[in-house]
Image: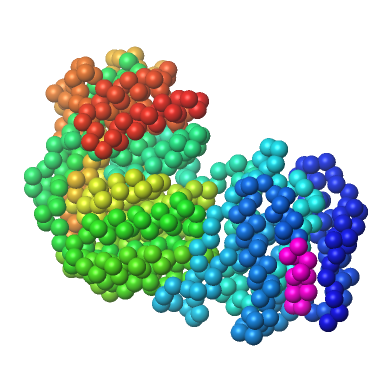
Amino acid sequence: MKKTDIKDSDIQNALNKIEIPVFDETAKQQAIETALSAFDAQVEKKFKGLSFIQRPISITANIFKKIGDWIMNISYPQMATASGLVIAVLVVALMPQMQEQVPVMKEESLQEMAVSKKTAPQAVVAQTKNLQASSQAYPVTPAQPSMVMLSPVPQVDFDVAEGGGGAPAIARMPEKMARIAQFKAQSYQQAQVLGEYQKQEVAQSIRRVQEQVELESSGEERDRFSKEKQNPVRLTAQHPVSTLSVDVDTASYSFVRRQINAGRLPQPNSVRVEEMINYFAYDYPTPTVASQPFKPTVAIYSTPWNSKTKLLHIGIKGYSATKNIKKSNLVFLLDVSGSMSSHDKLPLLKNAFKLLVDTLKPDDTVAIAVYAGAAGTVLEPTPVKERAKIIAALDRLSAGGSTAGGAGIELAYSLAQSSFAKDGVNRVILATDGDFNVGITDKDALKGMIEQKRKSGVFLSVLGFGQGNYNDRLMQELAQNGNGIAAYIDNLNEARKVMVQEATANLFPIAKDVKIQVEFNPGRIAEYRLIGYETRVLNREDFKNDKVDAGDIGAGHTVTAIYEISLVGGTGQLIAPLRYGKPAKSSNNSGEFAFLKMRYKLPQETKSQLMTRAIDNDDIVEKIEQLSDDIRFGSAVAAFGQNLRGGRYTGDFSNQDIITLANSGKGADPYGYRSEFVSLVRLADSLK
């Protein structure tokens, strides 16, 4: 074959003809287009008459030379990408041997996998990630033919702007764009050696890298949260009843902590005040019999941030059922898609589940299902006494592909049913960043499927990992419909808290569909406002309807609900009285502030039971110093959560005031969580 390598002079001549515009978004795109056009023209000139498959092979020698030059000129953070490109070159060099083992695709198929000019700058990183992926797969039972899971991909730091400004360096240096363009042909070559399933993975990986590059260069947060307005102030005369589902989730606090520790205040929608409060354990009185799984603790005291109002604090703690725990049948449903490759996702996930395995009994069973472009079984239901087998299955997991979450959920439920433990605990534990993008992606369809599955006695809990594309909104709704918890794991300490210290509470329910309803006496309470629980508010008629789902309480779980109330005759009302309104009349129980009702179902029952309690003068605590440490600390967390959401109702109550209040209620703090909270508030104060 006649030598047709591109010479340095050819590329240099092409670069000399490029008109470099002033740097902005339009100029960047123009530079990209011009560089690619120049390269394409040179390729067409030099390789006229050669097939599309032969062209990449022919330029191998030139690529070897250029990669050396490029590595010498780049900054240190780009070294990860450079290393990947060296591997890409080796793939090109080994092309003849690969062709002998892999059927050649039609040229039209290669054209479909070509990287478009719009995604060319990101293609370098995408190809680095894909070409580093090994063709060796871990053992897996495929849900569809020829499923292959790619090997782990190292995280690439693409935001390597030289000279500051936050834009990728390649966008500022057209001469490097031309070099990048040289590797465009490699995507064709890569497509040649991949089957249909892997082709989809390549396209999906390119899309993900493009999104990540755009995210890092823009600084935009793409984590998804429900946009819920804070609960309004209610006029008791018009709305005397408040109904809610309990919430034992803790995901919001962990995510908020991660954001603050990273040096930025969290977006307000990520802050669910009730989950921040309920992140901490409180020493409320514990029931002594399983038939009455909890009893309420109530206190009325002056609002720390508003001397004109009071707080109504309602706390419950679940019955500790550790001695009555029977067999556990668990299915770990693990997201191994491409979006899970970073160190704070799949690697952390595997360590977290190893901790959980160590808390289980020898006769408990564990199965492992995974999903990416398709769903597969990694480990059939296996007794925990075969720990080495379970750990080995976890160690083999690697990330790659798109995210068929719906298919994975169906498979996990099927595994749970195959080893169903009668009178035991049957639970699927989903671990993901929530980025479902293929298969059943419709939120309502997923919720409906999980709602149907929970009726069989298999519940679902959700553990979130990572950030950048974290879909908190979907995960919350899946956990709520699956009768499970939603937690967010941002580090190994949090994994230990969720998987070890709170394993009993998170796995073993002692009451389900727990609802709280408070009827306020308009003769004593003029206004009230529920703090948090925006996603858990129920209609008044839902309270007695056993068909309406609500939150579950696990063994030893604590749940706290706090209302801010304005007393009749006081000066704390925010709603002005009507000129022609009728004065509120007191009920026959004029000494009561409110009447508390709770409904719950025991784990194996379908009919709810009712628990009631009057709230009256005996529940008033005159001085905040007389309150328990738990109540003082809980009110400090409530204030901080509200401040993070904008502080609409907290007035001038500062973070320093919160720190003082929290320190007064730290108590014994055996694990240091309350001390960590104080440090978090102090750090947030410095970020204002």
Q: Residue at x 28, y 67 (%)?
A: 388
Q: Residue at x 25, y 48 (%)?
A: 502
Q: Main secondary structure of the magenta part?
A: helix
Q: Quadrant of residue 415?
A: bottom left
In the rendered structure, does residue 54 fall within the stretch colored magenta? yes
Q: Is residue 164 visible?
A: yes
Picture coordinates of residue 343, whole percent (x, y): 47, 53
Between residue 60 and residue 527, name the one nearer to us. 60
Q: From the viewer's perspective, is residue 340 above or below residue 114?
A: above
Between residue 446 and residue 151, name the one nearer to us. 151
Name the side, left or right, on which 520 lies relative to 24.
left
Q: Which residues are magenta?
A: 53-65
Q: Residue at x 18, y 52 (%)?
A: 510
Between residue 564 and residue 351, name the one nearer to us. 351
Q: From the viewer's perspective, is residue 397 above or below residue 24?
A: below
Return the residue found at the far left: 288
In the rendered structure, does residue 627 fall within the stretch colored magenta? no
Location of the N terminus by quadrant is: bottom right
Between residue 408 and residue 577, name the one nearer to us. 408
Picture coordinates of residue 53, whole percent (x, y): 74, 77
Q: How is the image coloured?
A: rainbow
Q: Report the number of discs.
A: 0
Q: Residue at x 76, y 53 (%)?
A: 176
Picture coordinates of residue 335, whole percent (x, y): 44, 61
Name the side, left or right, on which 404 lies relative to 658.
right
Name the side, left or right, on which 107 lies relative to 488.
right
Name the side, left or right, on which 184 lies relative to 608.
right
Q: Is residue 406 visible?
A: no
Picture coordinates of residue 297, whole percent (x, y): 18, 33
Q: Quadrant of residue 424?
A: bottom left
